[in-house]
C-alpha cells in the first residue's frame, strides 16, 4: 500500500525513522517488500539516476508495482534519489513517484534555492513531495564523488530561509555522514550540535540523513577473504548514533552501501565455495534471504518494526 510521505513523516517524527533503500535489481525489490510486510514496517523505495540508467526506470517501477500486489500489506512510497531537474521533471511527469529529490547542494545558496524552487513548483501541482539538500556530503556513490575538502556542514542559520523560500517538504542535511564505505576517520561522526540547532529552527520538519549505512567491518573482511580487495579504513554510522539522531527530527535514513557490500559478499563467497556452479538464481536466492534478514534487523533498529499497521491516516 502506497502511503503519503507527509502522513508517514507526521507519524514517525521523533519516534522512529524510515529506511530509504536504494534499489537496482529485482532481487532487492523482492526482498524489500517481503521484509517490510513481514516486519509490518514502513519503508521507502529509492531509485537513483544510476539505477534508472542501469535497469530502466519503467522496468524497476513495474517490478515495484508487481511486488506491491504480491505483498499488499507492505506500506511504502517511491522516491527519486539525488536527481537533477531533468530526472525530477521526468519522475513528476510519469506519475509513478510519490517523492523526488532535487540535489543542488553543490551550487551557491541562491542557485540552490532557484533550482529547488523550480522542482517544487511542478511537483506540488501533483501533490508530490520534494526533498532538497543543504550542505555538501563527501564520499563516492554512483555518479556522486565529492572530496573531503569540498564537503561542508549544513549551516543552521540558513535552513529557515532555505525552506521558506523553496517550500521544500523535507531537507537532507550534511552533519558528518558521507556517501560510500569510507565515512569517518578517527573520532568523527554525526554532529548532534548541528542537528539540535536545525531542530530548534525547524520544529517537526522532516530531516533526512544521507550516508546512513553502518558498514559492517566483518562484511569487508569476508569480501576480502573471498578474493575482494577493499581498502582498509572503511567505517560507517554506529547504531547508537543512528538511533540518537531520530530524537533530533531525522525521519528518513538512506541505505545503499550496506546492501552493496552484502551483494558483493554473498556472490563472492558463493562462487568461491562453489566454483563449478554457474546458475545465477542460486546466489540470487541467497542474497534475497540475507537482504530480508538485514532489513528486518534494520527495521528493529530504527524503530519502525510493527508500526505500519498502526499509522494514523488523519
Image (cartoon, helix red, strand yellow):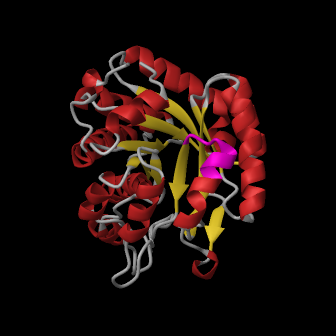
Percent coordinates x, y for residue 240 in the rendering:
23, 63
- Residue in front for this viewpoint, 14 or 177: 14
- For this view, does 240 lie left or right of residue 53? left
Residue at the spot 39% in from the left edge and 80% down from the top edge: 233
Q: Is residue 129 magenta?
A: no
Residue at the spot 42% in from the left edge and 55% down from the top edge: 199
Percent coordinates x, y for residue 23 in the rendering:
50, 41
- Residue in front for this viewpoint, 119 or 30: 119
Residue at the spot 32% in from the left edge and 18% down from the top edge: 73
Could you tell me which quadrant the C terminus lies in? top left
Q: Looking at the image, is 120 positioned above or below residue 212? A: above
Region of the chain picked out in magenta, as a range: 162-169
How many numbered marks appear? Answer: 0
Q: Looking at the image, is 60 positioned above or below residue 198? A: above
- For this view, does 139 lie left or right of residue 161? left
Percent coordinates x, y for residue 44 in the rendering:
45, 36
Secondary structure mostly seen in magenta is: helix
Q: Is residue 164 magenta?
A: yes
Amino acid at each position: 500500500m502506497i502511503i503519503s510521505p507527509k502522513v508517514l513523516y507526521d507519524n514517525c517524527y521523533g519516534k522512529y525513522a524510515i529506511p530509504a533503500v536504494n534499489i537496482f535489481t529485482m532481487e532487492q525489490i523482492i526482498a524489500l517488500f517481503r521484509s517490510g510486510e513481514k516486519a509490518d514496517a514502513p519503508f521507502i523505495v529509492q531509485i537513483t539516476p544510476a539505477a534508472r540508467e542501469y535497469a530502466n526506470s519503467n522496468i524497476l517501477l513495474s517490478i515495484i508495482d508487481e511486488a506491491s500486489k504480491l505483498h499488499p500489506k507492505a506500506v511504502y512510497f517511491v522516491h527519486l534519489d539525488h536527481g537533477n531537474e531533468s530526472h525530477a521533471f521526468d519522475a513528476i511527469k510519469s506519475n509513478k513517484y510519490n517523492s523526488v529529490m532535487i540535489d543542488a547542494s553543490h551550487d551557491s545558496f541562491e542557485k540552490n534555492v532557484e533550482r529547488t524552487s523550480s522542482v517544487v513548483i511542478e511537483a506540488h501541482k501533483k501533490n508530490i513531495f520534494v526533498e532538497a539538500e543543504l550542505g555538501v556530503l563527501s564520499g563516492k556513490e554512483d555518479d556522486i564523488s565529492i572530496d573531503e575538502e569540498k564537503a561542508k556542514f549544513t549551516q543552521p542559520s540558513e535552513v529557515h530561509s532555505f525552506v521558506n523560500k523553496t517550500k521544500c517538504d523535507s531537507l537532507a542535511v550534511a552533519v558528518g555522514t558521507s556517501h560510500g564505505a569510507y565515512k569517518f576517520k578517527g573520532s568523527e561522526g554525526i554532529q548532534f550540535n548541528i542537528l539540535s540547532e536545525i531542530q530548534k529552527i525547524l520544529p517537526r520538519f522532516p530531516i533526512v540523513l544521507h550516508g546512513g549505512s553502518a558498514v559492517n567491518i566483518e562484511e569487508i573482511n569476508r569480501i576480502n577473504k573471498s578474493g575482494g580487495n577493499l581498502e582498509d579504513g572503511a567505517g560507517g554510522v554506529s547504531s547508537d548514533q543512528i538511533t540518537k539522531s531520530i530524537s533530533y527530527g531525522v525521519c528518513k535514513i538512506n541505505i545503499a552501501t550496506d546492501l552493496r557490500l552484502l551483494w558483493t559478499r554473498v556472490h563472492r563467497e558463493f562462487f568461491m565455495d562453489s566454483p563449478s556452479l554457474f546458475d545465477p538464481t542460486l546466489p540470487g536466492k541467497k542474497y534475497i534471504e540475507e537482504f530480508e534478514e538485514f532489513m528486518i534487523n534494520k527495521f528493529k533498529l530504527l524503530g519502525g518494526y510493527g508500526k505500519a499497521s498502526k499509522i494514523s491516516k488523519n
